[in-house]
Amino acid sequence: MPAEPTVLAEGDGQQPADPLSPPGDTEARPAARRSGWASLRPLVLRLHFYAGLLIAPFLLVAATTGLLYAGSYQAEKILYADELRVSVPAGKSELPLTRQVAAARQAHPEGTISAVRPAPEDGATTRVLLSGVPGVDSDQTLAVFVNPYTGEIRGALAQYGASGALPLRTWIDGLHRDLHLGEPGRLYSELAASWLWVIAGGGLVLWFGRRKALRKRHKPGNATGRRRTLSLHGSVGVWAAVGLFFLSATGLTWSTYAGQSISDLRDSLGQSTPSVTAQAAGEHAGHGGAAGTARAGAGADVGLDAVLKSARGQGLSDPVEIVPPAGDASGPTAYVVKQIQRSWPEKQDSVAVDPANGAVTDVLRFDDYPVLAKLSRWGIDAHAGSLFGIANQIALAALALCVILLIVWGYRMWWQRGRASSFGRPMPRGAWQDVPPYVLVPLMAAIAVLGYFVPLLGIPLVAFLAVDIVLGEIAYRRGRRTYA
């Protein structure tokens, strides 16, 4: 939330020290040491202003693309209705899953089967996911949509991620995540997420710090011009603050550098996300979103329908995804059947099923996940807009609109102040000496730790402080020449 650095003079009666005052002027430096908050307020004000002014363009892009993503779920249902939905024939039951997969393979023999998602409800299609298909990105699969009642192929579309994003949502997701620039592009979103909570927190502190003074000076609703813009900016920022903190925290879990720090911390605490053991012959195998090919002619295989029946016996209800065994030199592994519902209540249980006899060899319940693993799952799904369905998506769209409005109002305040004020008043020369040691030392330690674990917060912060120190020195020297 970019804010004007000189709002201090407008609200609380505390005039900031003027760096242009001549040496010896009592306004240049307070004679008595101020309280911890009073001495830190100019720093918070400047940090909020600098970050709002310079980081806001990145936040604006993230908010705009996030707004588009929030609407992509419903747009996807409309745009791909032919692939996603079918009419339910009267008195006709679904075909065996093996026949549905056979129909998909007959229409699309290219690639290998990486997973199968049976129709989760009446009127929905079955998805047969193929990896290694020419023309499909390596991090995506080709989803073949099958009418579960007739075996008709309804279409084939590229699919991305565990949420099953189709081309529209995949494209918007890439725009939001990295601007379609790959790993270098992810720095923009990490920078935005790293600073969003700082900007929101600074604005929140400043707003409550000046609220009492604002009420004394003018009645609500009577403000005009820049004061009205400030009032709108602050009020919306206060109401949206909790949501902005949440978006920042959950966004960092996906980031390159801070995300790795979070992952390492969870691992060290034994809070990483567990996985079911895909074991059929004493060996472990990877069974992520795209496993290897299904075994063909490698001994007995009970088939998909028997595997699904075994999973149902363990309480796994729709929607589910079946990942075929990954054949390797040490022998076959198990089928992995996992629930993929990301809406509330979450369904994330998974089982491993021996392909030779259909016996369940391992069971992992979401209830048994470590606390941080559960919180991470819920946070990511809420950030992505799937945890609470359309209500979640509406809330995200509202937050994105709030961020856009806050940025517009912030820049408007800067403009209303006048371009001549440029970057406002820098920190007065020697202002750090006014901060009590019991405040300054813990503050600097906290900043150092945060800067280490969240480098795209720490590096710009050092740059902001360095620029302000230089500006303060220039203003001080200019003032000495003026009053010499």
Image (tube, rainbow, N blue to C red):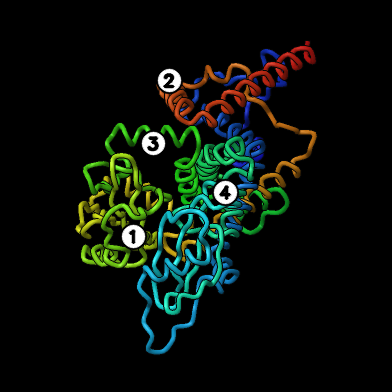
- Mark 2 vs mark 1, foreground winner is 1
Q: Secondary structure at mark 2?
A: helix
Relative placement, left or right, of 426 versus 142 is right
Q: Nearer the viewer, mark 1 or mark 4?
A: 4
Q: Helix or strand or loop: what does disc 1 sit on?
A: strand
Tell which of 306 and 31 is nearer to you: 306
For mark 4, give the secondary structure. Answer: loop
- Residue of label 4: 137
Q: Can residue 421 be seen from the camera position used here?
A: yes
Identify the mark nearer the N-term, 3 or 1.
3
Does residue 398 appear anywhere in the picture?
A: no
Q: Residue at x 28, y 44 (%)?
A: 331
| Residue behind mark 3 | 263
From the image, state whether disc 3 or disc 2 is nearer to you.
3
Q: Nearer the viewer, mark 3 or mark 1?
A: 1
Of pointers 4 and 2, the one earlier in the residue sequence: 4
Query: Which numbered disc flags the more N-terminal residue, 3 or 2?
Result: 3
Residue that carries the numbered disc 1 in the rendered image: 339
Quadrant showing the C terminus: top right
Q: Residues within 10 Å of mark 4 (few under 14, many from 20)?
A: some
336 with respect to 388 (left or right): left
Q: Which residue is mark 2?
A: 441
Name the quadrant of the N terminus: top right
Q: Alpha carbon of mark 2 to alpha carbon of mark 1: how far?
A: 49 Å
Tag 4: amino acid = Asp
Mark toward the start of the polypeptide (1 vs 4) = 4
